[in-house]
Amino acid sequence: TFCDDCQNPGRINVCARGLYKSFSGREILSGVDIDITPGSITCIIGPSGTGKTTLLRALALLDYPDRGSIDVDGKSYNFPLSPGVESIADPPWPRLTAVFQSLFLWPHLTLRENIMLPARNINAERAEKDIVGLTKVFEMDAFIDNYPNQASIGQRQRVALARALILNPQYILLDEITSALDVEQTARILTKLSHLKERGIGVMLITHHIGFAQRAADQIIFMDGGRVAEKGGSEIIGSPQSPRLRQFLSLVEEAG
């Protein structure tokens, strides 16, 4: 059942309710509710193996949840699918776009070609203009015409993010996009996310950088054991309400 906001025709957001997902008999998502609002940044934190990436893939409608509902700007997707239906006919791509740690760059194309190929099928003229700005923002001039195997993981992460942004999504889902970036590049990504927020784009990102989440997020969601264990604004990092979040943050601090 959707929240009241999602039952309102014309409501603009991503609203997921009651998401369940199991693999090999092990429940990974256990009734997750989550919202992504235009012009806001949601950070998901939590220990490894708690379902964060599974949730992102479900929200991107790449791995369907076993049960639950996802509403994207008033269009509802209900699971499980009807008998005999194997896939949804009208996924919300590229309005909703995801970037994963594995990056999925085509090895036989240059980094520039990797960025441009999806966009050319949507609006080639706009993409030719946008890539100029993206190249400048992410300082890619020196390597953008190299192939993926000639680039560092940090360079490839910037390319994957640029490839998503050039599609001009309304919602963008990001899985550990700063994991291989240095402090300066991480700060640059934070600035770029702030620009996306100002443009009314809804951002959801998984991160293990607690400070990054605290600086960037309008909403922080702490996942544990496949559930949303605590959520709130950035203040939950300084004043966690649940013992489990306090324990998690303490362990993160000890690990340095």
Image (cartoon, rainbow, N blue to C red):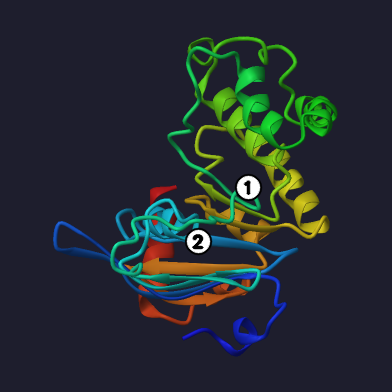
CA gap, disc 1 to disc 2? 22 Å
Nearer the observer, 204 or 122: 122
Q: Residues within 10 Å of mark 2 (few under 14, many from 20)?
A: many
Does residue 236 appear left or right of residue 208 in this picture? right
Position of residue 11 relative to residue 40, above or below, is below
Residue drawn at 69 percent across, 33 percent down: 119
| Residue type, label 1 | Pro
Q: Which mark is residue 94?
A: 1
Q: Judging from the image, what secondary structure is the residue with disc 1 in?
A: loop
Task: Kindly identify the residue that appears in the image at 42 percent across and 59 percent down.
Answer: 58
Please tell me how many numbered marks the rendered image carries.
Answer: 2
Judge from the rendering whether residue 177 lies leftward or rightward of residue 197; answer left or right: left
Q: Identify the disc placed on residue 242.
A: none
Percent from the top left, x then y, of residue 135?
76, 25
Give the quarter of the image for residue 161: top right
Label 1 or label 2, whichever lies nearer to me, is: 1
Mark 1 or 2, nearer chain start: 2
Residue tagged 2: 44
Where residue 76 appears, x then y in whole percent? 53, 72
